[in-house]
Amino acid sequence: MSETRRERQREATREEIKATARRLLAEQGTAGLSIRAIAREIGLTPPALYRYFASLDDLVTALIVDVFTALAEQIEAARDCAGPQAPPSAKLMNVLRAYRRWAVDNPADFGLIYGTPIAGYHAPREITVPVVIRGFAVIVGLLEEMTQQEEIIPVPSMQMPPPGVEASLQAMIEGDGYPVSVAALYMGTVGWTQFHGIISLEVFGHLPPVVGDTNAFFEAQLRNILIGMGWKG
Amino acid sequence: MSETRRERQREATREEIKATARRLLAEQGTAGLSIRAIAREIGLTPPALYRYFASLDDLVTALIVDVFTALAEQIEAARDCAGPQAPPSAKLMNVLRAYRRWAVDNPADFGLIYGTPIAGYHAPREITVPVVIRGFAVIVGLLEEMTQQEEIIPVPSMQMPPPGVEASLQAMIEGDGYPVSVAALYMGTVGWTQFHGIISLEVFGHLPPVVGDTNAFFEAQLRNILIGMGWKG
DNA sequence: ACACTTGAGTGAACACTGTAAACTATTAAC
DNA sequence: GTTAATAGTTTACAGTGTTCACTCAAGTGT
């Protein structure tokens, strides 16, 4: 771990570039995200940035990883903010609310990771999948706890996913050494898709004209979805 | 309705431009969607296109309307393909499957309307909302039929949406003269968000690495979601 | 049938974009 | 103190959306 002066300096400018990029992203959307704009902002010539990122796509990939990480940290913070004694169901609801609030407050970031961020660009899976999993794992972990404490008694349909799906989930559990039941993982997946649907429609502006009070809608769905899985709420 | 020769010609090139745009979109994603590329393909100089669309954004908006319309037509075709005698539940399942298949087969189109299509661009609501509603209305209509024929007996949570939401739905029913029960509209909204979550995660590639067999996952959710609302399937 | 108007299309230009190559100057290493 | 690596610049190319001034053909009015 040779922490030479140069390497530290290099890492610092790399961070500065990413920070500037995310600021521009938040201010002007993906339109403002250009090598030249970042360079201008930071006081360098555009080609200089190529010392730090091989291309704009490369920079975007790095941003995506950062954004997923930030989201995962928000989620983990929300899980822990009610104290370790809190029932897992309370933690889970905090987590889901935090997920939504983060998406609504940072629509550009959300669009970057869950939309079609930059023209023609889609992040390489082998890089994004692990960081996606981190936030996802929190949700699954809490569902597992809820199951063990019998706060939730998974309904039959959640206990037996379709064969093809079960195989994939099983492989995930074994492959990643992930000590969790198939039911919890399946509930996590189902819940993830359902909450993602609500949040993504809200962020992109399609939901508000229909439901009006998106807050109330979300809270109602929060209960409905968990109850639908077998929560004794 | 003066159908002068010139006006017909004009409309024809407008259509040709849009068709070329959608082809480029399907072939190369939003990256290939450029005024100059379209002009090149179609054998015109770039500025000529400004006779037909005020800007690229304007063209994109027109494309979005077309895409929503195409989706609505797919949905309506799927509703009717099983014949008028078919039970509404069968029609609804056909509709939802058609929705998914369309999205999976036309990811660029799907991204255009439900993602962050072009850098910094978001379609004006007053234009998109009506075309969104058209497909949505089909789903709601079938849920209403299912309710009337008692194929579905809405669970309590679907019969009483939260107050703020109910007000908005009620306003929608009255404002648009839309002869449908609040419960059906609410179920439609909830189902819409949930299916959208699955489909959008699948199209953008986040779901497959987790569930493996997305087909089986979708079919299972199709049943689960309807049953969760009170379907006697 | 002829003049007049309208509108489609072009060419050149401006201000941008990502990126590559060659070069300079600074900094670390021996 | 010499040498090697590396940060950064200049210049350049090919592409983008868009505007302006212009040409030329098609339709219209008399």
Image: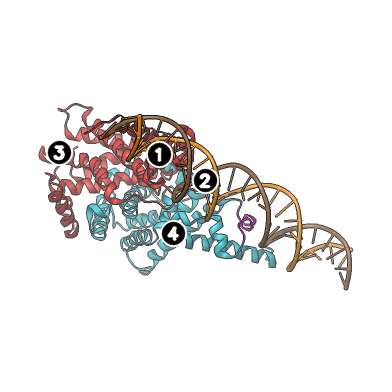
Chain colours: A red, B cyan, C brown, D orange
- Name the kind of residue labelled 4 in the image: Gln
Tell me if B185 is positioned left or right of C29 in this view: right
Q: Are marks 3 and 2 on the same chain?
A: no
Task: Judge left or right: residue A166 versus residue A32.
Answer: left
- Which one is earlier in the sequence, the residue at label 3 or at label 1? 1
Q: Which residue is mark 1?
A: A107
For image coordinates 17% across by 34% down, the residue present is A88
Q: Main secondary structure of the magenta part?
A: helix
**Which is more N-terminal, label 2 or label 4?**
4
* Residue topped by disc 4: B28
Q: Chain of mark 2?
A: B
Residue B95's x, y, as percent?
A: 36, 61
Q: Are marks 4 and 3 on the same chain?
A: no
**Which mark is on residue B82?**
none
Q: Magenta part of the protein: which range?
A: B45-53
Residue B117: x, y in percent? Answer: 45, 50
